[in-house]
Image: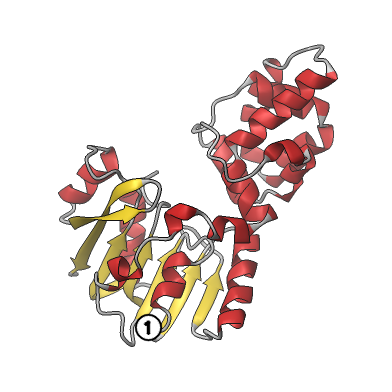
Amino acid sequence: MADIGWLDVTQISFNALLLLEPIHGEGLASGYYKPTPQMGTALKANPSVEWYLRKLYPPVNDYIDQCLALANPNPTPEERRQAEIHVMIEIQDWLVYVLDPAKYDELQFLNWDDASLLSMADFKDKVVLDIGAGTGRLAFTIAPVANVVYAVEPVSKLRQYIWEKRDRLGLDNIFPLDGTITQIPLPDDFADIIMAGHVFGDRPQEEYNEMSRVVRSGGMILLHPGTNANSEEDQHAFLLDQGFKYATFEEPGDGMKRKYWKTINK
Protein backbone atom coordinates (compact mmCIF):
# COMPACT_ATOMS: atom_id res chain seq x y z
CA MET A 1 0.00 0.00 0.00
CA ALA A 2 1.21 3.48 -0.81
CA ASP A 3 1.62 5.93 2.06
CA ILE A 4 -1.84 7.50 2.35
CA GLY A 5 -0.50 10.22 4.61
CA TRP A 6 -2.99 9.89 7.46
CA LEU A 7 -0.29 9.61 10.16
CA ASP A 8 3.40 10.36 10.51
CA VAL A 9 4.28 6.83 11.56
CA THR A 10 7.95 7.73 11.97
CA GLN A 11 6.93 9.26 15.30
CA ILE A 12 4.97 6.21 16.49
CA SER A 13 6.24 3.24 18.47
CA PHE A 14 5.71 -0.20 16.97
CA ASN A 15 4.03 -1.01 20.30
CA ALA A 16 1.01 0.84 18.91
CA LEU A 17 0.11 -2.53 17.37
CA LEU A 18 -0.73 -3.64 20.91
CA LEU A 19 -3.91 -1.55 20.51
CA LEU A 20 -5.15 -3.54 17.51
CA GLU A 21 -8.37 -5.52 17.89
CA PRO A 22 -9.58 -8.93 16.64
CA ILE A 23 -11.03 -7.44 13.45
CA HIS A 24 -7.48 -6.34 12.54
CA GLY A 25 -6.09 -9.80 13.20
CA GLU A 26 -8.78 -11.13 10.89
CA GLY A 27 -7.59 -8.66 8.27
CA LEU A 28 -3.99 -9.89 8.52
CA ALA A 29 -5.14 -13.49 8.23
CA SER A 30 -7.50 -12.84 5.31
CA GLY A 31 -4.87 -13.04 2.59
CA TYR A 32 -5.19 -9.37 1.62
CA TYR A 33 -1.89 -8.60 3.33
CA LYS A 34 0.88 -10.78 1.95
CA PRO A 35 3.70 -12.03 4.22
CA THR A 36 6.66 -9.66 4.01
CA PRO A 37 10.22 -9.62 5.31
CA GLN A 38 9.50 -6.24 6.87
CA MET A 39 6.69 -7.64 9.02
CA GLY A 40 8.85 -10.61 9.94
CA THR A 41 11.80 -8.40 10.88
CA ALA A 42 9.59 -6.05 12.91
CA LEU A 43 7.89 -8.89 14.78
CA LYS A 44 11.17 -10.62 15.48
CA ALA A 45 12.43 -7.37 17.03
CA ASN A 46 9.20 -6.94 19.03
CA PRO A 47 8.29 -10.32 20.55
CA SER A 48 5.59 -8.80 22.74
CA VAL A 49 3.74 -7.61 19.61
CA GLU A 50 4.14 -11.05 18.02
CA TRP A 51 2.75 -12.73 21.15
CA TYR A 52 -0.15 -10.26 21.33
CA LEU A 53 -1.19 -10.76 17.70
CA ARG A 54 -1.09 -14.53 18.07
CA LYS A 55 -3.34 -14.38 21.16
CA LEU A 56 -5.57 -11.70 19.68
CA TYR A 57 -6.64 -13.78 16.69
CA PRO A 58 -5.13 -17.30 16.54
CA PRO A 59 -5.89 -17.86 12.81
CA VAL A 60 -3.22 -15.21 12.12
CA ASN A 61 -0.49 -17.65 13.24
CA ASP A 62 0.19 -18.97 9.73
CA TYR A 63 0.64 -15.45 8.43
CA ILE A 64 3.02 -14.58 11.28
CA ASP A 65 5.05 -17.77 10.75
CA GLN A 66 5.44 -16.99 7.05
CA CYS A 67 6.58 -13.45 7.86
CA LEU A 68 9.13 -14.65 10.42
CA ALA A 69 10.53 -17.08 7.85
CA LEU A 70 11.26 -14.07 5.61
CA ALA A 71 12.78 -11.91 8.38
CA ASN A 72 16.22 -10.36 8.13
CA PRO A 73 18.28 -12.61 10.43
CA ASN A 74 20.70 -9.89 11.55
CA PRO A 75 19.22 -6.44 10.97
CA THR A 76 20.93 -3.28 12.15
CA PRO A 77 18.93 -0.99 14.46
CA GLU A 78 18.22 1.26 11.47
CA GLU A 79 17.00 -1.71 9.40
CA ARG A 80 14.73 -2.81 12.25
CA ARG A 81 13.21 0.64 12.50
CA GLN A 82 12.73 0.89 8.74
CA ALA A 83 10.91 -2.46 8.85
CA GLU A 84 8.63 -1.18 11.62
CA ILE A 85 7.88 2.00 9.68
CA HIS A 86 7.10 0.00 6.53
CA VAL A 87 4.58 -2.12 8.43
CA MET A 88 2.93 0.88 10.08
CA ILE A 89 2.57 2.64 6.73
CA GLU A 90 0.77 -0.47 5.44
CA ILE A 91 -1.74 -0.41 8.30
CA GLN A 92 -1.88 3.30 9.09
CA ASP A 93 -5.66 3.37 8.58
CA TRP A 94 -5.97 0.87 11.47
CA LEU A 95 -3.56 2.91 13.57
CA VAL A 96 -5.58 6.09 13.04
CA TYR A 97 -8.70 4.27 14.25
CA VAL A 98 -7.09 3.06 17.50
CA LEU A 99 -4.81 6.03 18.21
CA ASP A 100 -6.68 9.14 17.09
CA PRO A 101 -10.11 8.73 15.42
CA ALA A 102 -10.54 12.50 15.39
CA LYS A 103 -7.70 12.72 12.88
CA TYR A 104 -9.63 10.41 10.54
CA ASP A 105 -12.72 12.58 10.97
CA GLU A 106 -10.70 15.53 9.65
CA LEU A 107 -9.61 13.88 6.39
CA GLN A 108 -10.42 15.80 3.24
CA PHE A 109 -12.27 13.04 1.41
CA LEU A 110 -14.95 12.99 4.15
CA ASN A 111 -15.96 16.58 3.34
CA TRP A 112 -18.47 15.51 0.69
CA ASP A 113 -21.76 17.35 0.36
CA ASP A 114 -24.34 16.10 2.90
CA ALA A 115 -27.05 16.55 0.29
CA SER A 116 -25.50 13.73 -1.73
CA LEU A 117 -26.62 11.27 0.98
CA LEU A 118 -29.77 13.03 2.17
CA SER A 119 -31.20 13.05 -1.37
CA MET A 120 -30.93 9.25 -1.74
CA ALA A 121 -33.87 8.36 0.51
CA ASP A 122 -36.50 9.76 2.83
CA PHE A 123 -34.82 9.37 6.23
CA LYS A 124 -37.55 11.13 8.21
CA ASP A 125 -38.57 9.06 11.27
CA LYS A 126 -36.81 5.98 9.90
CA VAL A 127 -34.84 3.26 11.69
CA VAL A 128 -31.43 3.40 10.01
CA LEU A 129 -28.28 1.28 10.24
CA ASP A 130 -24.82 2.63 9.37
CA ILE A 131 -22.65 -0.44 8.76
CA GLY A 132 -18.90 -0.11 9.25
CA ALA A 133 -19.68 3.29 10.73
CA GLY A 134 -16.10 4.36 11.42
CA THR A 135 -16.30 7.81 13.02
CA GLY A 136 -19.97 8.09 12.02
CA ARG A 137 -19.80 10.32 8.93
CA LEU A 138 -22.99 8.80 7.48
CA ALA A 139 -24.74 8.34 10.82
CA PHE A 140 -24.28 11.92 12.00
CA THR A 141 -25.46 13.28 8.64
CA ILE A 142 -28.89 11.66 8.82
CA ALA A 143 -29.43 11.54 12.61
CA PRO A 144 -31.16 14.96 12.75
CA VAL A 145 -34.01 13.62 10.59
CA ALA A 146 -34.06 9.90 11.38
CA ASN A 147 -35.94 8.28 14.25
CA VAL A 148 -32.92 6.26 15.39
CA VAL A 149 -29.53 5.36 13.92
CA TYR A 150 -27.55 2.27 14.90
CA ALA A 151 -23.86 2.68 14.09
CA VAL A 152 -22.51 -0.84 13.61
CA GLU A 153 -18.72 -0.79 14.06
CA PRO A 154 -16.30 -3.56 15.16
CA VAL A 155 -13.51 -1.30 16.51
CA SER A 156 -14.20 -0.39 20.14
CA LYS A 157 -12.17 2.84 19.95
CA LEU A 158 -14.38 4.05 17.11
CA ARG A 159 -17.56 3.12 18.98
CA GLN A 160 -16.26 5.11 21.96
CA TYR A 161 -15.55 8.05 19.66
CA ILE A 162 -19.12 7.92 18.30
CA TRP A 163 -20.55 7.90 21.86
CA GLU A 164 -18.45 10.94 22.77
CA LYS A 165 -19.29 12.78 19.56
CA ARG A 166 -23.04 12.16 19.86
CA ASP A 167 -22.99 13.56 23.41
CA ARG A 168 -20.99 16.57 22.27
CA LEU A 169 -23.45 17.27 19.44
CA GLY A 170 -26.54 16.47 21.50
CA LEU A 171 -27.74 13.73 19.12
CA ASP A 172 -29.21 11.16 21.50
CA ASN A 173 -30.71 8.95 18.77
CA ILE A 174 -27.36 7.43 17.65
CA PHE A 175 -26.36 4.12 19.24
CA PRO A 176 -23.03 2.39 18.45
CA LEU A 177 -23.15 -1.42 18.24
CA ASP A 178 -20.40 -4.01 17.89
CA GLY A 179 -20.74 -5.90 14.61
CA THR A 180 -19.60 -6.20 11.01
CA ILE A 181 -21.17 -6.09 7.58
CA THR A 182 -21.37 -9.90 7.54
CA GLN A 183 -22.51 -10.20 11.18
CA ILE A 184 -25.09 -7.53 11.95
CA PRO A 185 -26.31 -8.08 15.56
CA LEU A 186 -29.95 -7.33 14.84
CA PRO A 187 -33.02 -9.43 13.89
CA ASP A 188 -34.53 -9.97 10.46
CA ASP A 189 -36.54 -7.11 8.94
CA PHE A 190 -35.31 -4.65 11.57
CA ALA A 191 -34.33 -1.52 9.63
CA ASP A 192 -36.01 0.81 7.19
CA ILE A 193 -32.69 1.87 5.63
CA ILE A 194 -29.20 0.36 5.70
CA MET A 195 -26.18 2.46 4.71
CA ALA A 196 -22.56 1.41 4.23
CA GLY A 197 -19.48 3.22 2.99
CA HIS A 198 -16.10 1.89 1.93
CA VAL A 199 -16.61 -1.24 4.05
CA PHE A 200 -18.61 -2.89 1.26
CA GLY A 201 -16.91 -5.09 -1.31
CA ASP A 202 -14.58 -7.68 0.23
CA ARG A 203 -17.26 -10.41 0.12
CA PRO A 204 -20.06 -8.82 -1.88
CA GLN A 205 -22.56 -11.69 -1.92
CA GLU A 206 -22.23 -12.46 1.78
CA GLU A 207 -22.41 -8.76 2.66
CA TYR A 208 -25.44 -8.17 0.45
CA ASN A 209 -27.24 -11.21 1.88
CA GLU A 210 -26.72 -10.04 5.46
CA MET A 211 -27.92 -6.50 4.75
CA SER A 212 -30.94 -7.88 2.90
CA ARG A 213 -31.78 -10.04 5.91
CA VAL A 214 -31.87 -7.09 8.29
CA VAL A 215 -33.71 -4.55 6.11
CA ARG A 216 -37.50 -4.80 5.98
CA SER A 217 -39.41 -5.41 2.77
CA GLY A 218 -39.80 -2.07 1.01
CA GLY A 219 -36.73 -0.72 2.77
CA MET A 220 -33.56 0.48 1.10
CA ILE A 221 -29.85 -0.34 0.95
CA LEU A 222 -27.57 2.64 0.21
CA LEU A 223 -23.91 2.05 -0.59
CA HIS A 224 -20.86 4.28 -1.01
CA PRO A 225 -18.13 1.68 -1.63
CA GLY A 226 -15.54 4.09 -3.00
CA THR A 227 -15.61 2.82 -6.59
CA ASN A 228 -14.24 5.35 -9.06
CA ALA A 229 -16.80 6.86 -11.38
CA ASN A 230 -15.22 5.49 -14.58
CA SER A 231 -13.96 2.15 -13.30
CA GLU A 232 -15.26 -1.34 -13.99
CA GLU A 233 -14.45 -2.80 -10.59
CA ASP A 234 -15.91 -6.10 -9.42
CA GLN A 235 -18.12 -4.36 -6.84
CA HIS A 236 -19.71 -2.27 -9.58
CA ALA A 237 -20.55 -5.27 -11.75
CA PHE A 238 -21.93 -7.17 -8.76
CA LEU A 239 -24.21 -4.34 -7.68
CA LEU A 240 -25.56 -3.84 -11.19
CA ASP A 241 -26.31 -7.57 -11.37
CA GLN A 242 -28.28 -7.24 -8.11
CA GLY A 243 -30.41 -4.44 -9.56
CA PHE A 244 -28.84 -1.43 -7.86
CA LYS A 245 -29.12 2.00 -9.46
CA TYR A 246 -26.22 4.40 -9.22
CA ALA A 247 -25.09 7.99 -9.63
CA THR A 248 -21.86 9.86 -8.99
CA PHE A 249 -20.72 12.30 -6.33
CA GLU A 250 -17.43 13.98 -5.45
CA GLU A 251 -15.14 12.92 -2.63
CA PRO A 252 -12.95 16.01 -2.17
CA GLY A 253 -9.35 15.27 -3.01
CA ASP A 254 -10.21 11.80 -4.34
CA GLY A 255 -12.35 12.56 -7.36
CA MET A 256 -15.74 11.36 -8.55
CA LYS A 257 -17.15 8.21 -6.94
CA ARG A 258 -20.25 6.10 -7.38
CA LYS A 259 -23.12 5.73 -4.91
CA TYR A 260 -25.71 2.97 -5.20
CA TRP A 261 -29.24 2.36 -3.97
CA LYS A 262 -31.87 -0.36 -4.14
CA THR A 263 -35.32 -0.96 -2.67
CA ILE A 264 -35.53 -4.45 -1.19
CA ASN A 265 -38.75 -6.36 -1.85
CA LYS A 266 -39.16 -9.68 -0.09
Quadrant including the C terminus: bottom left
The one of 152 and 13 positioned closer to us in this rendering: 13
Could you tell me which residue is drawn at 43 percent across and 60 percent down? Answer: 111
The one of 192 and 146 positioned closer to us in this rendering: 146
At which x and y percent is residue 153?
53, 62
Residue 197 placement: quadrant: bottom left
Residue 228 placement: quadrant: top left
- How has the structure been colored for display? secondary structure
Is residue 139 visible to us here?
yes
The one of 229 and 201 positioned closer to us in this rendering: 229
At which x and y percent is residue 128?
38, 76
User: Taking 148 as reference, is 164 above or below it?
Assistant: above
At which x and y percent is residue 151?
49, 70
Q: Residues within 10 Å of mark 1 (few under 14, many from 20)?
A: some
Residue to which mark 1 is pinned: 146
Left or right: 154 in relation to 201:
right
At which x and y percent is residue 188?
36, 72
Could you tell me which residue is drawn at 30 percent across and 80 percent down? Answer: 123
